[in-house]
Image: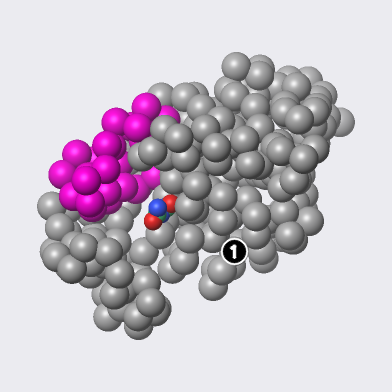
Amino acid sequence: MSRTVSIPAEPGPLTLEAGKTALVVIDMQRDFLLPGGFGESLGNDVDQLLKVVPPLAALIAAARAAGMLVIHTREGHEPDLSDCPPAKLNRGAPSKRIGDPGRYGRILIRGEYGHDIVDELAPIDGEVVIDKPGKGAFYATPLQDVLDEHGITSLLVTGVTTEVCVHTTTREANDRGYECLVVSDCVGSYFPEFQRVGLEMIKAQGGIFGWVADTSVVIPALQQLTVTAA
Ligand code: C5J
């Protein structure tokens, strides 16, 4: 076991340090992933997101085994929608808005079945769950404080959707000084072309706001890393 590991990422290797790296799992919620949920009701192909679940489950298991901080996020709002700006509420299909009844309860409302994380990736005791009203995980949340408390400087970023909440969170984190490695087979978009271009954008221009690698290299790296090593 070692305190640091070099990941063969793109556009170049990234060194991660035990105890300073957290896994962030963004919005793997039933409303986005499940057949019949909010995402599918907007005409999206949820299979594009569901295929992320097996590699992400394996990555979460590796992070837990390494003793790494695991943080889950959920996009959603208070039942009275007081934290949902009109500019967000009033767009989209008029019959499918945040707060409306959906197959899995009121759409993207905290406490509803659809708002919670899919069973396969459910947080375990001690893991941090951040409820966020926006696309980015830093906006109007305690995420920065949580990372500061744990001395985190690097993030493994995963979840959905690649071009929306994953991108926004990675950009927010990059601007705050975190090194972000986006795990390519653990992020998903309803749109294959957005998935491809979204990943290209992160690592372009020498890694303009992050690094990209898949689980075939990230999981073995985590297996070499332990937060308890001297
Ligand atoms: C979206 C997200 N796409 N988690 N949310 O509205 O990316």
Kindly indicate the quadrant of the structure image that contains residue 147: bottom right
Whole-percent x, y for residue 16 in the image? 78, 34
Q: Quadrant of the C terminus?
A: top right
Quick one: label 1, few (<14), some, or many (20+) residues within 10 Å? many
Element carrying mark 1 = loop
Q: Is residue 67 visible?
A: no
Residue at image coords 72%, 28%:
10
Mark yes or no: residue 171 visible: yes
The residue located at (59%, 64%) in the rendering is: 138
What x and y, as percent, mark residue 135? 48, 60
Q: Which residues are magenta?
A: 28-53
Colour scheme shown? one colour
Viewer-proximal residue among 40 and 110: 40
Looking at the image, residue 188 lies above or below residue 41: above
Image quarter for residue 35? Answer: top left
Q: Nearer the viewer, residue 63 or 159?
A: 159
- Residue at 82% x, 32% y: name it: 15
Q: Quadrant of the N terminus?
A: top right
Snapshot quadrant of residue 148: bottom right
Q: State the image coordinates of residue 63 (x, y, percent, origin top left).
A: 60, 32
- Asked whether residue 168 is drawn in magenta, I would say no
Residue 43 lies in the magenta stretch: yes
User: Compared to 133, does 200 lie above or below?
Assistant: above
Per the image, the residue denoted by label 1 is 138
For the point 21% across and 63% down, the residue is 93
Q: What amino acid type is highlighted by mark number 1?
A: Phe
Instruction: Answer left or right for 21 relative to 197.
Output: right
Residue 24 percent coordinates (x, y): 57, 45
Q: Is residue 190 above or below residue 85?
A: above
